[in-house]
Image (cartoon, rainbow, N blue to C red):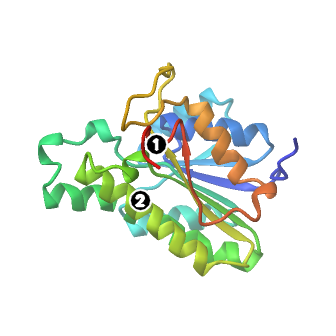
């Protein structure tokens, strides 16, 4: 199936990460131009080389509005934005799960960081009449096992829906993809009150479809990838 995005320009924030790299590969296979974005230039260059030097890359820290503006200004005419840059849950200190400072920091690194990049690209998308934004959140949004995980992921979903509504009818869509555990060796079983594992490529397949021309009427949605939390409606 031709997804209708050949020649479109995609900016993948967190492009050197496990999910970002898989999304880059999938979009490249559809003929899109890909720009990897992140804080570590050396890592971005290495991933770009591993992908055959086809993607470009630009340094960007989504906690810093100035670097976001500079990167978006350098790329220009971004048609597809994928936000996949946030500290993985396992890197956060579980002993500080209720700590307001850690929660504020995690929300800034994810939900507010995503808002900074969206704020930089959405006006141009509206002006050109085409845009696809896909934000990678997580299934912790659906549970109360962790205060930090629930707050930072729920904030992504809520902000994305509000912006999708604000851009309704403009040709711009904004959706959220919610993996549980992403691993190269997913388990076949799903634990009660947990989500199913998925591979980076499985997450990327959904992201790529939502970025496609065929997904023009899908917006404001929050979609699980991997079995959605077992036992929760």
Image point (41%, 59%), residue name: 62
Q: Is residue 214 above or below residue 45?
A: below
Image point (64%, 47%), residue name: 207
Is residue 20 visible in the rendered image? The answer is yes
Residues tagged 2 and 1 counted as in contact (Cβ below 8 A)? no
What secondary structure is marked by label 1?
helix
The residue carrying mark 1 is: 41
Q: Observer-nearest residue: 116 or 177?
A: 177
What secondary structure is marked by label 2?
loop
Is residue 48 visible in the rendered image? The answer is no
> Going by the image, does 90 lie left or right of 81?
left
Q: Residues within 10 Å of mark 2 (few under 14, many from 20)?
A: many
**Position of residue 66 measured from the top left corner of the image (x, y, whole percent):** 42, 69
Quarter that holds the N terminus: top right
Quarter of the view holding residue 172: bottom right
**Position of residue 166 measured from the top left corner of the image (x, y, whole percent):** 59, 80
First of labels 2, 1 by sequence position: 1
The residue carrying mark 2 is: 62
Image point (34%, 45%), residue name: 87
**Position of residue 231 measured from the top left corner of the image (x, y, whole percent):** 42, 40
Quarter of the view holding residue 156: bottom left
Separation (CA) of disc 2 from disc 1: 14 Å
Q: Observer-nearest residue: 45 or 115?
A: 115
Q: Is residue 205 above or below residue 154?
A: above
Q: Nearer the viewer, mark 2 or mark 1?
A: 2
Q: Residues within 10 Å of mark 1 (few under 14, many from 20)?
A: some
Quarter of the view holding residue 123: bottom right
Indicate which disc residue 115 carries. Answer: none
């Amino acid at each position: 199936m031709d997804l209708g995005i050949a020649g479109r320009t995609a900016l993948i924030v967190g492009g050197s990460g496990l999910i970002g790299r898989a999304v880059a590969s999938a979009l490249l296979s559809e003929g899109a131009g890909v720009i990897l974005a992140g804080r570590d230039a050396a890592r971005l260059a290495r991933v770009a080389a591993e992908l055959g030097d086809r993607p470009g890359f630009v340094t960007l820290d989504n906690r810093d509005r100035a670097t976001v503006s500079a990167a978006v200004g350098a790329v220009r005419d971004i048609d597809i934005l994928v936000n996949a840059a946030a500290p993985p849950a396992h890197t956060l200190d579980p002993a500080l799960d209720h700590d307001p400072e850690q929660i504020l920091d995690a929300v800034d690194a994810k939900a507010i960081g995503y808002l900074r990049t969206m704020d930089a690209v959405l006006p141009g998308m509206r002006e050109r009449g085409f845009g696809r934004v896909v934000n990678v959140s997580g299934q912790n949004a659906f549970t109360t096992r962790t205060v930090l995980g629930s707050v930072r992921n729920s904030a992504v979903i809520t902000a994305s829906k509000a912006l999708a509504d604000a851009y309704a009818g403009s040709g711009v869509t904004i959706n959220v993809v919610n993996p549980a555990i992403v691993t190269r060796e997913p388990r076949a079983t799903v634990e009660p009150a947990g989500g199913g594992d998925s591979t980076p490529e499985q997450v990327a397949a959904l992201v790529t479809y939502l970025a496609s021309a065929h997904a023009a009427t899908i917006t404001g949605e929050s979609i699980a990838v991997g079995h959605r939390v077992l036992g929760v409606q």
